[in-house]
Image (spheres, rainbow, N blue to C red):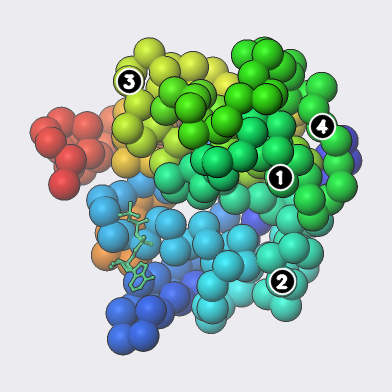
C-alpha cells in the first residue's frame, strides 16, 4: 500500500442546507498517521464535515491534503487519493452478499484487498456468500469498515461506528480501528457520540458545538478537561 500520507487540513469550512447553516467556518487539522476524533451532540455538524471531506456535498472553504487543495476533485477522485468515508448507518447493501458488498467498495480503485480484509476480519472469509442484511449489527459494522478498506484508503473516515452496538462489540470495533491505524498506517478521522470510547483511542480531538469548534487538543489532555467531563463524560449526553 502506498503510504505517502500527509496532513488533512481544513480552513474556513462552511456547509449550508438551504437556509440551515450546519458548519460555520470550521478549521481543523488531522495530522498524518493520527486518529483524530470529532465529538459533539446531535446536529453539531460532524457528519456534514465528513461528507464535505469526502466530496459528497457543496461547501465553501478549503480542504487540503498536504499543501494541495482537493476542492476541485469529485468524490471518486478523492477516493483514488485515498480519502474514503464509512458512513453513519453503515450504508451497506443489505440485499447483496458480503462478497458483493466488498467488491462494491473496490469499484473506484479496482483494488482487491480481500486478503487484507480477511486478516483484520477473519469471520468474513466464511461469510462471503451470506446476504449482508442477515449479519448481526456488529458484523454489519465490520463489513462496512471492511468495504471501506477495499478502496485502499490512506485517510479513513468513520461516522459513528459504535452506534447501536453492545459494549463488547464496541470493544472489538475499537481494536480494529487501532489495528487499522497502527498496522496499516491509515490516518483515521473518527466521528463519535461515544466520547469515552473515542478519547480512549484518539490522538487528537475536536469538539463541535452548533457548527463550530468549541474545544480541541490532544485527546489525552481533553479527557481531563472539566467541560468535557461535565458535558460529555458525566451525565446523559444530549
Ligand atoms: P448527528 O450525529 O445527528 O448526525 P452531526 O453532528 O453529524 O449530528 P450533521 O448531521 O452534520 O450533525 O447536521 C448538522 C445540521 O445540519 C443539523 O442541524 C441537521 O439538522 C442539518 N442537516 C443535516 N443534513 C441535512 C439535510 N440533508 N437537509 C437539511 N438539514 C440537514
Q: Does the rendering let one see residue 12?
A: no
The mark lying in front, picked from 2 and 1, is 1
List the residue tagged with mark 3.
166
**First of labels 2, 1 by sequence position:** 2
- Image location (x, y in percent) of residue 50: 52, 57
Q: CA distance from mark 3 to mark 4?
A: 28 Å
> What separation in Å lies between label 2 and label 1 (alpha carbons)?
17 Å
Q: Which mark, residue 113?
A: 4
Circles 4 and 1, Cβ within 8 Å, touching? The answer is no
Dot 3 falls on a residue whose secondary structure is loop
Marks 3 and 4: CB-CB under 8 Å? no
SS label for mark 4? loop
Label 1: which secondary element = helix
Q: Earlier in the sequence, mark 3 or mark 1?
A: 1
Q: Viewer-nearest of labels 3 and 1?
A: 1
Q: Residue at x 48, y 27 (%)?
A: 134
Can you give x and y, in whole percent of width and height, for residue 230 in the image?
15, 37
Q: CA distance from mark 4 to mark 1?
A: 10 Å
Question: What's the distance in space between the residues labelled 3 and 2, CA to CA?
Answer: 36 Å
Name the residue at 35% across, 26% down. 165
Q: How many marks?
A: 4
Assess disc 3: are there few (<14), some (14-19) or many (≥20) residues with their C-alpha within 10 Å of its C-alpha.
few
Q: Is residue 20 above or below residue 76?
A: below
Residue identified by numbered label 2? 74
Report, in whole angstroms, how far the alpha carbon at label 4 lies from the one at label 2: 23 Å
For residue 227, above or below residue 200: below
Depth order, front residue of 43/30: 43
Closest to the observer, 42 or 204: 42
Task: Tell me which numbered mark, 3 or 2, is placed earlier along the sequence.
Answer: 2
Near mark 4 (Cα within 10 A), the count class, few <14, some 14-19 or many ≥20, is some
Image quadrant where one finds the N terminus: top right
Amino acid at each position: 500500500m502506498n503510504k505517502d500520507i500527509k496532513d488533512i487540513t481544513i480552513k474556513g469550512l462552511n456547509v449550508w442546507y438551504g437556509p440551515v447553516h450546519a458548519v460555520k467556518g470550521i478549521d481543523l487539522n488531522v495530522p498524518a498517521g493520527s486518529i483524530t476524533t470529532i465529538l459533539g451532540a446531535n446536529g453539531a455538524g460532524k457528519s456534514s464535515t465528513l461528507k464535505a471531506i469526502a466530496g459528497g456535498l457543496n461547501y465553501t472553504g478549503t480542504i487540503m491534503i498536504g499543501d494541495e487543495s482537493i476542492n476541485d476533485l469529485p468524490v471518486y477522485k478523492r477516493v483514488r487519493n485515498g480519502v474514503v468515508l464509512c458512513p453513519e448507518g453503515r450504508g451497506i447493501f443489505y440485499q447483496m452478499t458480503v462478497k458483493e458488498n466488498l467488491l462494491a467498495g473496490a469499484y473506484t480503485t479496482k483494488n482487491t484487498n480481500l486478503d487484507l480484509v480477511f486478516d483484520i476480519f477473519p469471520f468474513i472469509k466464511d461469510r462471503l456468500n451470506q446476504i449482508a442484511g442477515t449479519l448481526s449489527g456488529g458484523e454489519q459494522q465490520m463489513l462496512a469498515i471492511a468495504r471501506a478498506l477495499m478502496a485502499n484508503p490512506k485517510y479513513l473516515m468513520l461516522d459513528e461506528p459504535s452506534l447501536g452496538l453492545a459494549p463488547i462489540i464496541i470493544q472489538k470495533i475499537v481494536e480494529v480501528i487501532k489495528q487499522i491505524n497502527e498496522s496499516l498506517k491509515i490516518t483515521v478521522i473518527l466521528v463519535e457520540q461515544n466520547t469515552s470510547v473515542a478519547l480512549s483511542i484518539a490522538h487528537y480531538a475536536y469538539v463541535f458545538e452548533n457548527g463550530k469548534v468549541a474545544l480541541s487538543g490532544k485527546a489525552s489532555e481533553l479527557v481531563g478537561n472539566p467541560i468535557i467531563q461535565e458535558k460529555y463524560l458525566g451525565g446523559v449526553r444530549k
